[in-house]
Structure formats: structure tokens, C-alpha cells
Amino acid sequence: MSVLRETATVGSRERRATRMLFFIGGISAAAWAALVPFAKSRVGLDDGALGLLLLCLGVGSILAMPTAGALAVRYGCRKVLTVATVILCAALPLLAVLSTVPSLAVTLFVFGAALGSADCAFNIQAVMVETESKRPLMSGFHGFFSLGGIVGAVTVSGMLSFGATPLIGALTAVAAMLILLAVAYRGLLPYGGASMGRLFALPRGIVLFLGMLCFVVFLVEGAMLDWSAVFLTEIRGIQSAEAGFGYACFSLAMTLGRLTGDVIVKKLGPKLIVAGGGSLAALGIIVSTVVPSWQISLGGYALIGVGCSNIVPVLFSAAGRQKAMPQALAVPALTTLGYAGILAGPAGIGIIARHSSLAAAFLWLAALMVGVAISNLALKPTARN
């Protein structure tokens, strides 16, 4: 049986805890982004092999999400989030020291499963908290994921730049994540929504359309996570210890966009957010890839962050408020379909890079974001946040 929903009104403690959950997710993702070049060098992989290795993270995420949504409905967000975060904290230090492809593949799978489970569960909590608060909160929540990305990338990359080992950088991120989990624990929802007789359903109707858009945007975000550091080191020639600053620029811009996003979305509406955001992201990808300057590349990553910043929060809010599927089914379904972009993206970029070039792979992403911008024509005014 699913956990019964408590009657207490969601308040500031739950809103604060939800922000911390997203912050933890951002730290974990960014810490791994800074470690990717070290793992690539340690094992001796080319771009194609690295892409296949990174596929393990995506597979773990995509397989775990339906189960995480079901467990959140059955046992509550609090238990799922606690277990997932502990697993993340156990896997991250291993990713900093393992030196064989099989061990890295297994650990990346586990890390991806934990990250996907946490992401699904804290988005379920975010939708419920926003709905019960009766005001726009989703962009702000997602902004804390980006803020966590900044803190994680700058902290870990900064430590590596000053001579710390990858293991020390990873352990620092783990300590911060565990402290935040302990502080947020009482605000984690002990329920996960009504199951409506099922624990998972394939997306349909408007949820399927929103999920397709999420797929593309998450694909781009996954590329920034897994390939931005590699691009900067191998194409732009900067040092591996400093390559994580590319993801930091992306995360900083995304953070600023999302922390101001609730007001912007309310003023402009979702159609303009999707059209303008997709266009800006495509422009940023083109600029960072074509102009032969690492400084310009960092600026391009920032433009990508601004463009992508509020698209996904708009889509999650729309999924939480639509009526085609129950909320407790729609959010896990949308999350799963959206994160399929992380499953396909890193491996796809590696394959394109092997047969063409890493720059060509990034330009392929720009074309997809143009498609997202055009898709705003299919968004109905009733999806407005």
C-alpha cells in the first residue's frame, strides 16, 4: 500500500527542504563532471569509448526512475531520497579512484541509478509543494540544482587546481551532501502522492509531448555535464584541473535564470520561454563550438545555461497541472522520458565524435535546440504557469 498523505499544510520547512534536495543533486552532478577528464585519462579511453562508458550512467538513471516513482508513491519521498543520497555519497569517491573499465562501468551505473532516483523523487516533492503552496516555485527549485552545480564545480575544480587529489575533491562533496541531507530531513515529505491504482504508466497526450521536449533539453544538459570539460581540454587546450569551470559557467548562468525564473515565467508565459530559451541555447552552442577561443567557449556555455534555464521548470509545472494523467504518474513518466536524453546524449556525442568530430557533435545539439524553440507553436495557452 502507498503511504497515506498527511493532512498538515506544506509550509516554509518543506519549501526549504525541497530547495536543499535540488542543491544536493547539483553538487553530485557537478562533482562528477569535474572528475570526468581524470577518469578518461586514468583508464586511457578515446572519445568513443568514453561515450560508451558514460552510457552506464544514463542506463542506471533511466532504469531506476520508474522504480523510484513507484517507491515514492508507496513509501514516501523521504525514504527514497534518503536512500538515494546515501548511495550517491558512497559511489562518488569510488569514481575518483577506480582505474579499470569494468569497475567504473558498474559504479557509474549505480551512481546513475541513485541520481535518477533522487531526481525523480525530489521532482515529485517539488510538484506537490508548488501545488499546495498555490504559487510558482518550480523555477526557483530547479535554480537550486544549478546553484549546487556551481558550488560543486567550483569547489572540486578549485581544489584540483590547487593540487588536491580527485579523491579529496570527491570526499569534500560527499561531506557537504550528507550535512545538507541531515538539515533537510524533517522537511522531506513522508508521502508521494496518490497512485490511482497504478505505480507507473507510459506518458501519453500532453505528457508525451512535454517529455519529448524534456528529452532534448536534458540531452543538452547532459552534454554540458559529461563533455564540456573534455571539449575544453582537448579542443581548446586548457588544463584538466581547470576544465570543470566550463560546467561552472553553464551552471552559473542557469542558476541566475532560474532563481529569477518564477517572475519571468509568470510575466512572459511558457510559449515565449520555450521559443526564446531554445533559440538562445542553440546560439550558445554554435558560438562556443565555432569560435576558436576558450574564453568565448565559456561565454557560449553561459548562453546555453540562460537559454535552457526555465524550459524544464515550465515543462514540469505543466506536467503537474495537466489532467490527462494523475500527477503521481505524470511526473515520474515525464522524468523518465526526459532523462532518456541523458541515456542517449553522452553516447551519441561520443559516437559522432569518433566518426566525425567533437565539434560536429555539439552542432548537432544546436539543431535539436532550434527544434525545441519551434515547438513552442504546439504549446497551448492553457499550459501557462
Image (cartoon, helix red, strand yellow):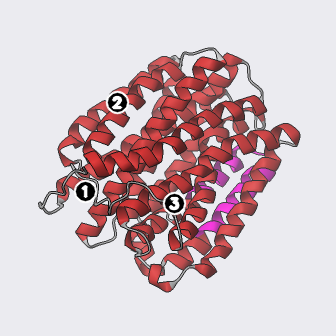
The residue lying toward the viewer, choosing from 126 and 16, is 126
User: What amino acid is at disc 2?
Assistant: Val
Residue at 44% over, 71% down: 318
Between marks 3 and 2 in the image, the one whose residue lies nearer the viewer: 3
Between marks 2 and 1 in the image, the one whose residue lies nearer the viewer: 2
The residue lying toward the viewer, choosing from 209 and 267, is 209
Is 171 a magenta residue? no
In three-dimensional space, the C-alpha distance between marks 2 and 1, rounded to whole angstroms, equals 22 Å
Sort mark 2 into few (<14), some (14-19) or many (20+) by Cα contacts within 10 Å. some
Query: Mark 2 = which residue?
Result: 86
Residues shaded magenta? 277-305
Please tell me the numbered disc located at residue 202: 3
Instruction: Give residue 223's position: percent from left, percent from top.
Output: 65, 46
Query: Where is the C terminus found, in terms of image quarters?
Result: bottom left
User: What amino acid is at disc 3?
Assistant: Leu
Query: Mark 1 = which residue?
Result: 15
